[in-house]
Image (cartoon, rainbow, N blue to C red):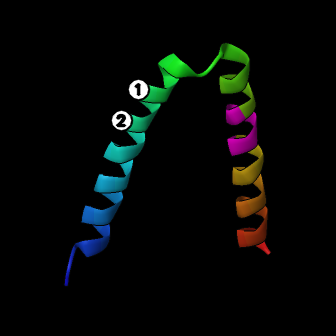
Amino acid sequence: MVGLGTVINTAAILAGGVCGALFGRVLSRSAQDTLMKVCGVGTLFIAISGAM
């Protein structure tokens, strides 16, 4: 099915936005900072492995 990846990606982005809006109020600022750093390091590992 053409465009299925686009639909799944859009749904995942919307779900992530909703989760972020809900958990942003629940998590402390330090927990949010830690999660942001973990996501950044994970992104770096994915980028480096993709470049190899």
Mark 2 crowdedness (10 Å alpha carbons): few <14, some 14-19, many ≥20: few
Q: CA distance from mark 1 to mark 2?
A: 5 Å
Please state the total of marks drawn on the protein image. 2
Q: Point out residue 38 in the picture as x, y percentages from the top left corner.
A: 74, 41
- Magenta segment's dominant SS is helix
- Contact, CB < 8 Å: mark 1 with mark 2? yes
Amino acid, disc 1: Ala
Amino acid, disc 2: Val
- Under circle 2, the secondary element is helix
Provide the residue designation for mark 1: 21
Query: As rendered, which of 29 and 51 lies closer to the eye?
Result: 29
Residue 44 part of the magenta-drawn span: no
Q: Quadrant of residue 27?
A: top right
**In which quadrant of the rendered image does the N terminus lie?**
bottom left
| Residue drawn where x is 77% and y is 70% of the image | 49
User: Is 13 on the left or on the right of 1, as rendered?
Assistant: right
Q: Point out residue 20 in the picture as x, y percentages from the top left corner.
A: 46, 32
| Residue drawn where x is 78% and y is 63% of the image | 48
Q: Quadrant of residue 29?
A: top right
Against 26, residue 17 (above or below) is below
Residue found at the far bottom of this picture: 1
| Residue drawn where x is 49% and y is 28% of the image | 23
- Under circle 1, the secondary element is helix
**In which quadrant of the rendered image does the C terminus lie?**
bottom right
Residue 37 part of the magenta-drawn span: yes
Instruction: Give the residues in magenta.
Output: 35-39
Against 5, residue 41 (above or below) is above
Against 5, residue 24 (above or below) is above
Query: As rendered, which of 8 and 3 lies closer to the eye?
Result: 8
User: Is 28 on the left or on the right of 21, as rendered?
Assistant: right
Residue 18 marker? 2
